[in-house]
Image: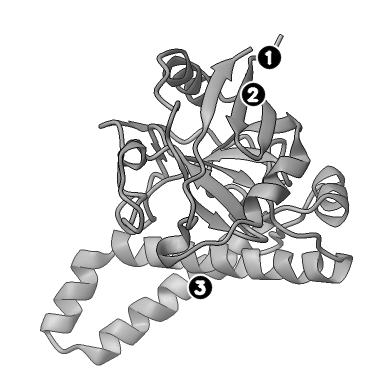
Amino acid sequence: MSAIVKISTSLGDMKVRLYDETPKHRDNFLKLANEGFYNGLLFHRIIKGFMIQGGDPESKTAPKGKSLGAGDVGYTIDAEFVYPQLFHKKGALAAARTGDEVNPEKKSSGCQFYIVQGKKYSDSELNQMEKQMLMQAKNKRFNAMLRENADEVMRLRLARDQKGLMALQAKLIDELEKEFKGKKVKFTDEQREAYKTVGGTPFLDNDYTVFGEVIEGLEIIDEIAKVKTGRGDRPEDDLKMTVTVE
């Protein structure tokens, strides 16, 4: 039996099933919930049509207007991507994290999370997104190849060897094309159906760890997403949470 937690707010309650397929995130969330860590914290970042985010420990005593989102518990959690089985449909519970430039391993925050609202997509939009995601994957791989050859790039630059730099670039592009030959990014039938009918944020797939989903109270996400926000997407009126294990 999967673990169930209840996230209560003044706008209503959501019941969330934590996935057994992501045990590190599941166990950490349960530990914090049982300790009462989340009680009194805010949903501090809300973007309508995208997601609602909370779990910053600094939000418990933050004065109105203070920027939030940098608080943590002093540790991160290794990414647990179970893709495409677990994805960013509406109601998905996922871990927030710092950006790739400082966190190439995509490790999760030890406490901050978000719940997806997203939007519904048409088949043509999903088809276009598949192409964009493939291009992004190629760009990321090419940047990684540049990092792997950083010493050679620096040597050629110091020597002002433009011809050598162009030759290296051509070599890497050729390797990249061979590596990606025949590769496609395709949403599964389950993903496609969910993104068309309930919605979500497919562009976050396989980039942030999804470790649970709302099984009761999806409509509460919409109610929370409606609240008026100010600087930093923080609600103008504090929206506190209580998290209990069922």
Residue beneath label 1, please?
2
Crowd class of label 1 (few under 14; some 14 to 19; many from 20; radius 10 Å) = few
Give the quarter of the image for residue 164: bottom left
Residue beneath label 3, please?
174
User: Which label's residue is closer to the chain start, 2 or 3?
Assistant: 2
The amino acid sitting under disc 3 is: Asp
- For the residues labelled 1 and 3, the Cα–Cα distance comes to 47 Å
The amino acid sitting under disc 2 is: Tyr
User: Could you say where residue 134 lies in the image, as x and y percent from the top left?
Assistant: 64, 64
- The colouring scheme, among rainbow, by chain, secondary structure or one colour, is one colour
Crowd class of label 2 (few under 14; some 14 to 19; many from 20; radius 10 Å) = some
Residue beneath label 2, please?
19
User: Could you say where residue 205 lies in the image, as x and y percent from the top left?
Assistant: 62, 50
- For the residues labelled 2 and 1, the Cα–Cα distance comes to 7 Å
For image coordinates 35% across by 53% down, the residue present is 64
The total of numbered circles placed on residues is 3
Q: Mark 2–mark 1 contact, CB under 8 Å?
A: yes
- For the residues labelled 2 and 3, the Cα–Cα distance comes to 40 Å
User: Could you say where residue 72 lies in the image, as x and y percent from the top left?
Assistant: 31, 37
Front-lying residue, 155 or 135: 135
Give the quarter of the image for residue 155: bottom left
Image: 109 above or below 222: above
